[in-house]
Amino acid sequence: MDEYGVVEGELLESLRHVREKEAPFNRVFSSMCTRPHPLAVRVHQKFIETNMGDNRLFPGTKDLEDRVIAMLASLLGTQNAFGYITTGGTESNIQALRVARDLSSKKNPNVIVPASAHFSFEKAARILGLEIKKASLDKCYRVDITSVENLIDENTIALVGIAGTTEYGQIDPIEQLSEIALSEDLFLHVDAAFGGLVIPFLERDYKFDFTLDGVSSITVDPHKMGASTIPSGGLLFRCREHMDQLMISAYQEEKQHSLTGTRSGASVAATYAVFKHLGRRGYKRIVDRCMKLTNITEKRALSLDINPVIKPVINIIALQIQNLDEVLSKLEKRNWYVSKTIKPKALRLIMMPHITEGILGEFLDDLEEVIGYVR
């Protein structure tokens, strides 16, 4: 730290240069986050000093959190769910497995997750002392139900299903996982961090939420397709007693359920504002537009004899391209920010709300040109 402070204008100018080094969102196809809605940004600033770790001081913001959880619950198939706003999917997944572990009396507990599960489950396992058993995937990159059944043993405490996988945007057969969870008396956690604010607005009806009796908890992130500010994750439980497993006594006899102590009330208020402002119809328009961009990409790819790994389910598409690393390198030189899947290797594109048809057209033209060079 400097002995004397820096003049505000000079400091802001230096920070402007820092910001210029970062990726411009209109050329980013690799992020599951997007620009927050302008209203969310304004509300975030108004609540910037609020701390959800001290509800005595900020009861109004706590009331907004309760309303956000109620809105998420109604979107995810129930009028009664219990949860809180987290820092994101990683915290939510850790906390869900923490509940599953604490509900169990198993000495060597294990959890069965799909091979497509997010790396946060590995973090959860290390923190919580759990064994992670990975179920194989079917030819469409959903978790294979037979593999799940074969992995269950006397130490299994929970199953995990993904609704919107990180690589392909695939939705696991949650309905079948729910049946297994009920028959085996297992906790079932659904990681819908990305898909939770996409799937309810698709034309096709997918069963993945609390409408299924076996689903115990759900992760859903408003700072992804919800267009809220970071950090705005969400964790919901079907039963109050599950939520209560997280409760500890805090300072001055307050109770906390969260993994972190200090929590941003600003992101809670921002999420409330954008939910209320957009409503279901607003989110339906956003998802429809993102799916339109996905369909445009699929059609253009097919016209170039490029096949998607799977037919897109949500607004994520993975394209099987020869000499992929060379293609990625050339795209990067043109300042396009894309990513690739691991197995099979494919170009992965996420059609977020910050992508316009014009920008997508520019990207697809560059992609076609680059592929032509490589071929």
Image (tube, grey):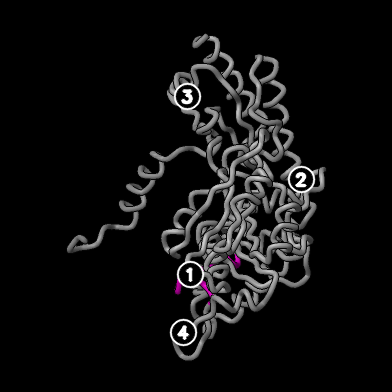
Work out how far the residue at label 1 is from the one at label 3, CA to CA, in angstroms.
47 Å
Residue 128 pos. (x, y %) = 45, 65
- Compared with 276, 359 (above or below) is above
Question: In this view, which residue lies farthest toward the left?
Answer: 3
Q: Is residue 34 visible?
A: no
Of labels 3 and 4, earlier in sequence is: 4
Q: Which residue is mark 3?
A: 328
Secondary structure under the numbered disc 2 in the rendered image: helix
User: Which residue is rendered at x = 31% and y = 51% of the image?
Assistant: 10
User: Which residue is rendered at x = 48% and y = 65% of the image?
Assistant: 108
Q: Is residue 254 visible?
A: yes
Of labels 3 and 2, earlier in sequence is: 2
Work out how far the residue at label 3 is from the one at label 4, CA to CA, in angstroms.
50 Å
Of labels 4 and 1, earlier in sequence is: 1
Work out how far the residue at label 4 is from the one at label 2, CA to CA, in angstroms.
42 Å
Of labels 2 and 1, earlier in sequence is: 1
Residue type at mark 4: give it: Ala
User: Of tags 4 and 1, which is closer to the observer?
Assistant: 1
Q: Which residue is mark 4?
A: 250
Q: Mark 1 near mark 3, Cβ–Cβ under 8 Å? A: no
Secondary structure under the numbered disc 3 in the rendered image: helix
Q: Mark 4 near mark 2, Cβ–Cβ under 8 Å? A: no
Q: Which residue is mark 2?
A: 285
The stretch in magenta equals: 257-269
Q: Mark 4 near mark 1, Cβ–Cβ under 8 Å? A: no
Image check: 154 left or right of 272?
left
Residue situated in front as seen by the camera: 102 or 375: 102
Q: Is residue 338 magenta?
A: no
Q: Is residue 267 magenta?
A: yes
